[in-house]
Image (tube, rainbow, N blue to C red):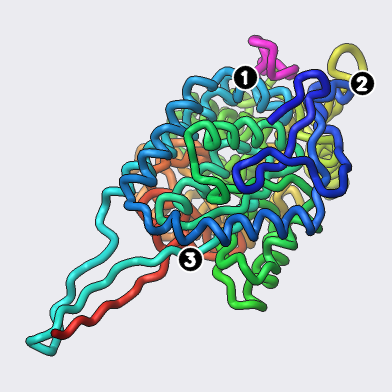
């Protein structure tokens, strides 16, 4: 997998670690210090992708013929191996994309749990017996795997997201070609090694590192890839979906969010402040379910704002490997520049920047991609910072008259991924559940937080309207086959 002397990482094709056909490599650098190279990763070509797809295609028939329990046993082994390497994988993640080490280890533990969950799914039923109108016939349904699935995963959750795509794809009998984000390709290689060491048959799972325009688009357009599951930006997701649709492939898109937290007049303000900070600023706000709009009823607006500011000023920004750090850097320079541009746009459009929103230019943080957490006041629903996904540590405070207006403002966006409300009133909670246009709604809990056994996905422009995780995953990775038997 890796040459320790040069920290070179490779593609994984047909059960072997291989350099790119081009021979080219690129640097994976640490966002905490742009001068630190975490590893050298492949700059792959269409030829590499062709090799990976051919390997997956050749392996899929034998893989699907294994029983669910046989496939599940291999996932259990991979989970055990990943658990034993939790520190190693967590440290690679922190060095490579910046989230704090406790968060990185927690994410790795979640990957382990997801593997074990889907390993168990191999023993669940996959069909139903249906009464036939013919008294001599036997009518039932079963499920068939898609064949070869392309997985395109992002950098913000480099273990959990690919695992929640790869594990169900494998347990339901598909082979996989995985394109991880280049920003987290070293972490991906360490995850891939767990599957290799578990004894996964050659060709069943392949990993190709390269640009989205070459490898990602190549996966979307490839005739031998039967389904694509993608998590990332709306612009790229739409391109992937269009390419898949053009050739009749199945696709699943999980894209952006502009997630609101609603603070009712009867809310526990201290708990609501903690949830807003945790949901909006952990992982430097780089979660698709992160809180970005804070919609507060006017009766408690000033109290909430004061307590929020006090808590945010206490957060320590720094290297995620430092045990004292609460908030790490943006994952890369481009993301940092995007966040800073939105902060400037917020000021230009008339919002009041109460705190933060700057890049440290002196000391140890000056060589990293850091942005101090930004708190905006006097935000209106039509401002860019209230409508567009920023994917950074920015909170926009919006004052409203009552909970009815709060829900109306919360729905005033093209996105519909997650939303939460803090209230003691059951009527407020039920109205929120009924009227909120989001795929995940949470009562007295932060917007960020997805349970692996429950369906996950968004409404409106946040997804392609399918669902990931839990037992809902079978709907994407398989097709129903109806069987009619007559003697």
Vertical comparison of 129 with 160: above or below: below
Q: What label sits on residue 414 in the rendered view?
A: none
Quadrant of the snapshot with the C terminus: bottom left
- What segment carries the magenta color? 314-326
Q: Which is more toward the observer, 363 or 383?
A: 363
Q: Is residue 129 magenta?
A: no
- Considering every residue shown, the one lying at the far right of the view is 362
Residue 344 appears left or right of 222: right
Q: Is residue 417 visible?
A: yes
Q: Residues within 10 Å of mark 1 (few under 14, many from 20)?
A: many
Q: Residue at x 74, y 17 (%)?
A: 319
- Towards the viewer: 451 or 53: 53
Image x and y of residue 318, in percent = 75, 17
Residue under the point 49% across and 36% down: 446
For the residues labelled 3 and 1, say whether their Cβ atoms are less than 8 Å apart.
Answer: no
* Residue that mark 2 sits on: 361
Percent from the top left, x then y, of residue 158? 63, 37
Instruction: Give the CA separation, mark 2 to mark 3.
Output: 51 Å
Res 146 label: 3
Which tag, 2 or 1, sits closer to the chain's start?
1
The answer to the question of whether label 2 and label 1 lie on touching residues, with beta carbons closer than 8 A, is no
For marks 3 and 1, the one nearer the N-term is 1
Does the magenta stretch mainly form a helix, a strand or a loop? loop
Crowd band around label 2 with a 10 angstrom C-alpha radius: few (<14), some (14–19), many (20+): few
Q: Which residue is mark 1?
A: 101
Q: Is residue 79 above or below residue 171?
A: above
Task: Say if the magenta span includes residue 323.
Answer: yes
């Amino acid at each position: 997998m890796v040459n320790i002397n040069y920290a070179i990482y490779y593609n994984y094709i047909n059960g072997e670690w291989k350099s790119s056909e081009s021979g080219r490599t690129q640097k994976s650098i640490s966002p905490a210090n742009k001068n630190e190279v975490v590893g050298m990763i492949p700059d792959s070509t269409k030829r590499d992708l062709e090799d990976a797809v051919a390997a997956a295609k050749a392996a899929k028939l034998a893989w699907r013929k294994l029983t669910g329990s046989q496939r599940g046993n291999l996932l259990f082994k991979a989970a055990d191996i990943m658990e034993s390497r939790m520190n190693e994988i967590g440290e690679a993640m922190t060095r490579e994309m910046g989230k704090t080490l406790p968060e990185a280890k927690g994410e790795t533990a979640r990957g382990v749990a997801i593997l074990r969950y889907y390993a168990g799914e191999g023993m669940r039923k996959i069909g139903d017996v249906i009464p036939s109108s013919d008294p001599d016939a036997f009518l039932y349904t079963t499920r068939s795997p898609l064949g070869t699935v392309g997985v395109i995963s992002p950098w913000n959750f480099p273990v959990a997201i690919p695992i929640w795509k790869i594990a169900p794809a494998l347990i339901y009998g598909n082979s996989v070609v995985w394109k991880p984000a280049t920003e987290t390709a070293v972490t991906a290689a360490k995850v891939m090694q767990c599957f290799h060491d578990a004894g996964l048959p050659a060709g069943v799972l392949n990993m190709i590192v390269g640009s989205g325009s070459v490898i990602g688009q190549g996966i979307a357009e490839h005739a031998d890839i039967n389904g694509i599951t993608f998590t990332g930006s709306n612009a790229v997701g739409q391109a992937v979906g269009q390419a898949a649709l053009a050739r009749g492939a199945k696709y699943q898109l999980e894209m952006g969010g502009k997630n609101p937290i609603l603070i009712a007049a009867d809310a526990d303000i201290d708990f609501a402040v903690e949830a807003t900070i945790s949901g909006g600023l952990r992982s430097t706000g780089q979660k698709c379910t992160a809180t970005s709009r804070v919609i507060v009823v006017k009766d408690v607006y000033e109290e909430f704002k004061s307590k929020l500011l006090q808590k945010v000023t206490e957060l320590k920004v720094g290297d995620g490997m430092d045990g004292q750090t609460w908030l790490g850097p943006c994952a890369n320079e481009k993301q940092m520049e995007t966040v800073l541009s939105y902060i400037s746009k917020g000021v230009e459009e008339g919002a009041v920047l109460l705190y933060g929103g700057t890049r440290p230019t002196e000391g140890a943080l000056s060589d990293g991609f850091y942005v101090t957490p930004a708190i905006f006041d006097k935000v209106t629903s039509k401002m860019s910072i209230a409508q567009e996904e920023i994917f950074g540590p920015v909170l926009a405070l919006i004052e409203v008259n009552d909970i009815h207006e709060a829900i109306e403002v919360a729905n005033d966006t093209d996105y519909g991924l997650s939303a939460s409300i803090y209230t003691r009133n059951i009527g407020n909670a039920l109205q929120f559940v009924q009227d909120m246009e989001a795929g995940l709604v949470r009562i007295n809990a932060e917007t960020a937080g997805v349970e692996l056994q429950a369906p996950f996905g968004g409404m409106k422009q946040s997804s392609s309207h399918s669902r990931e995780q839990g037992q809902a995953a079978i709907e994407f990775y398989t097709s129903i086959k109806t069987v009619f038997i007559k003697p």
